[in-house]
Image (tube, rainbow, N blue to C red):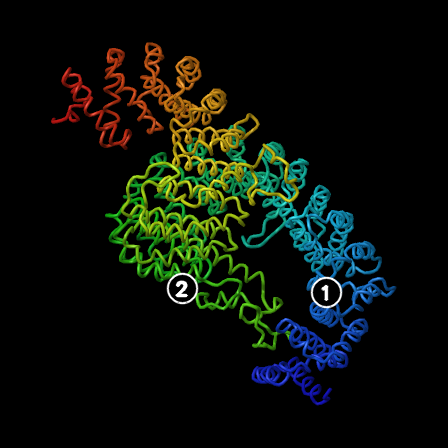
Amino acid sequence: MDPNFIQGLHNLLTQSVSSNDTVQLKAATAQLNTEYYKNPACISALASILASSPEVAVRQLAAVEMRKRINQKSGDLWTQLPQDERQQIKDKLPELILAEPNNLVRHSAARVIAAIASVEIPNGTWPQLLPFLHQSCTSAQTIHREVGIYILFTVLENIVEGFQEHLQSFFKLFESLLNDPESMDVRVTTVRALGVIAQYIDSDDKADIKSFQALLPSMIRVIGQCLEANNETGARQLFDVFETLLILEIPILGPHIAEFASFLLTCGGNRNFDAELRVLALNALNWTVQYKKSKIQSQNLAPAILEGLMPIATEPEPEDLDDDAPCRSALRIIDGLATSLPPTQVFPALRTLIQQYFSSPDPANRRGAMLALGVAVEGCSEFMTPLMNHVWPIIEAGLQDQDASVRKATCTAVSCLCEWLEEECVSKHAALVPAIMTLVNDPATQRSACTALDALLEILHDVIEQYLQLIMEQLAGLLDTAPLTVKAVVTGAIGSAAHASKEKFLPYFQPTMNKLQHFLVLTAEGEEIELRGITMDAVGTFAEAVGVEVFRPYFADMMKQAFQGIEMGSARLRECSFLFFGVMARVFREEFAPFLSSVVPPLLTSCRQAEHGEENETLSTSEAAAAFASGSSPSSAIAVVDEIDANGNPEVELEDIDVEKMLDVNSAIAVEKEIAADTIGTLFAATRNHFFPYVEQCTLELVSLLPHYYEGIRKSATDSLLEIVRTFYDLSDLQEWQPGTTVQTPISSSVKELIGHSLPPLLEMYESEDNKSVVSSLCVGFAETINKIGPAFLENHLDSICSIAVQVLEQKALCQQDPDQDENEEAPEDSAEYDSVLISSAGDLVASLANALGGDFAQAFGTFFPLVSKYYKKSRSLSDRSSAIGCLAEIIAGMKNAVTPSTEPLLELFYRALGDEEAEVQSNAAFAVGLLVENSEVDLSPQFLPLLAALRPLFDVAPDASPARLNSKDNAAGAVSRLIVRNTAAVPLDQVLPVLMESLPLKNDYLENRPVFRALFHLFRTNPQALYPFMDRLLMVFAHVLDPSGVDQIGDEGRGQLINLVGALNAEDPAKIQAAGLSAFVPGA
């Protein structure tokens, strides 16, 4: 080899690591690229420099560049080297690494071997490598073992295929290395190597799985040793390995989950360990709960985990919301347990702990108890509802606790309760509002109290009226005096007050706008930008509250502010502007159309934004700068521009990127994209045909977002796509469709084409969708679209859509699968509340199919009936039982008389459901049984008396009963009315009518007025004397439902028939009609 070539290369590398002169560095880079790195000889030259240079930094850079050259263009430069030179490097390099004194250089050189192996091993041209590695790993010299296992690890990272027949010998080797008596590095690297191997084990390789599992206790022990030694780097690497093992589709960790969870809990709770290491252990436990929930559930591990987490939850929280700490990790796991597992396994144990900790004299314990309660609500809300009488005393005591940290934690818990237990919180307004307002005035609790107030006001609706003046006076004062962070939550709370009070907010609108307007020109990053964004959100809520005419004077100026927000380079402000556009479009409808040409392009630009730290002009300079490290280390000082990956993009070394900052930027962009995608559907629905020019490009953009890694974007793209399809259909030349598998009413070609662009990608997304909320959204979106468009939406795709519903109800969808659960094993009946939401959405989809197919659904009903009815069992949750009966009712409504063959089993099921302990289930059962009697061709008259007896208790409801109880009474009235219409003679009217009349007018479910009034019209025609004793009551009911100042309660057809009836009654007794206030409704009056 030419010594001058080697010397020239050596000089340039020396210059690169020693010079701080940017011009000199650029010149060196250019010379290396043009004169050296395109020549295969550079690999041998770099090997020579690696072997002989006296300077560590030069040897290190030579190793890095040698690896890059070998990897370049899939090993093309390496294979151009003469065979003898390649052989010489392969012979000498392993020995050279063993002799290398510097650890960093050894590691970089090991990666060179891995790069060579990735080319040579598949070709079978390096048989000496494995024996060398085995010899090194079993050497008596520690340094040789460290080098040997590190090379093996890096080789395995690059290539496993050629080594799979050696797995069993690797396991034997690793067994001894995991217990290396002298070197932590050997033990850590062995675990990392096992992490790589695990990814290549197939679920059929039972022997390999068994061998791997035998090593797990030793692997877990190594993590413990890292933590004891305060070895953060090693601990991070090993937790990464275990997180990989958790997400694999092979059940490697299964038998050791209890041991692993207990180990992680012990590490996370050990206050002698560094806080960052404890967080790592707790994060791994969180992953264990998420990915191994079937094992956690089957072994009932939640109570023990909760007991270990509670002391951690009581530890101090850092001031900065973005800082992680053991207490925050512990609360995340409590949240994860509550949302992933059946509440029966979580809340009883947690409730005991909360009561125990809340009665402690130590405020830290009381604070931890309150925070634990708050995070558990989301996953246990349904289960908690009947227990709230035991929860409220703790909340009320917490709001008045002598310690400010406990009061703040209680405010957090109240915020969570308001989000998930709306009715219960509204019912406690008399206690909550004054207590929270007291805390709003206390500087120590102001911010937390305003957040709780915001959540409470959002749900108060009419109840807010009695508090509005007091609340607005206090909050308006804080807008002048409070610090910026408090002003932000105060502004949010005022927005919620407007949302709840609607037109009652009018007196406060203008004064509040005057106070808020200067927040809309804030520009500094951080708190100012956050306040500006929240103010935009609040102003949008004001517009919805006060209406078009009152808000119009502010409309143009506020749109200008929103456009400025887009230009400021902040993902948060872009997100707020997009939300504002959506609200303005909903408020101003077609008046918003002139803005579309300025609004749609930024939405599409946002959807197209690059992520993962790619260069992109839509990233602000500060965001882009934050994503990348400075590149000042020797290894990244030289940028080799001709390294191109398979997609034609310049390769970026992962070491050169600050991954955490990059992920922060990506998450902000991802949320912005989610809002942008969501806004697109809102704009079309609001502006209608004015949006036509943008439909095609928006549809294509939304389709391109369906495979996105972030589930929020997939969900909003799904929702918007289906919204576009429905709106487009509404605006087409549509005719009413007829149910059936055959499309009898064709849709326009443009609607058909739009469905053709949208539906296949959505079905494709489902095949790989692992997120339950996205599948749930897809099912609900499909149901809404099928109900609107009918059979034409299902054309050519009926089987695929049916299959989604079947898979979800069988709990066999990808998002419901658990690698530790046997394929033929039934999913447990006791499930998380989030699982019930998914089952309910699949029920909506089945009901929509019945609606679209009508009688043609009969064959599919044979498949779906057992799948749906299995969710009605005493052991199932309220949500499962209620949605099963509701789904069957909707199916009957769609199938009509085609339900006849299944009358008997359905009736038997509905009888059981009418006797359910929960009003929500009884309500659906009443609705279902009425529809069955109405639609089945089987004469059910012999069942009328037992049915009426089963329905009778539903009429006994106190005026202040829960909405579910009031609803069940309305549905019972509807069911009785359907019986009367079906066969009046089989109904003992003298006993039934007094009860039915007493239940009128209906207060909750106005849809049931339709069967009620059909029954009344029927009786007036066929048996009017039965109604005469109730005339005064009926005329009052008629006046109530016809009242033009109220909401429509009977629909146009019912209203027309009722007015005709009033006319007929007026002819008989005008004085009575006049006394009832109905004269105005007499035809011709």
Inspect the image, locate mark 2, and give the three-letter code of the amino acid beneath it: Met
Inspect the image, locate mark 1, and give the three-letter code of the amino acid beneath it: Val
| In the image: residue 123, left or right of residue 173 | left
**Please, what secondary structure does the residue beneath circle 2 have?**
loop
Q: Quadrant of residue 30?
A: bottom right
Mark 1 highlights which residue?
Answer: 155
| In the image: residue 56, left or right of residue 823 | right
Say whether residue 623 is visible. Answer: yes
Front tag of 2 and 1: 1
Going from N to C along the chain, the mark reached first, 2 or 1, is: 1
Q: Are marks 2 and 1 in contact (CB under 8 Å)?
A: no
- Residue most toward the left? 1084
Residue 479: x %, y % from top left = 38, 51
Mark 2 highlights which residue?
Answer: 568
Q: Which mark is residue 115?
A: none
- The answer to whether 82 is drawn above or below residue 240 in the figure is below
- Residue most toward the bottom? 4
Q: Residues within 10 Å of mark 1 (few under 14, many from 20)?
A: many
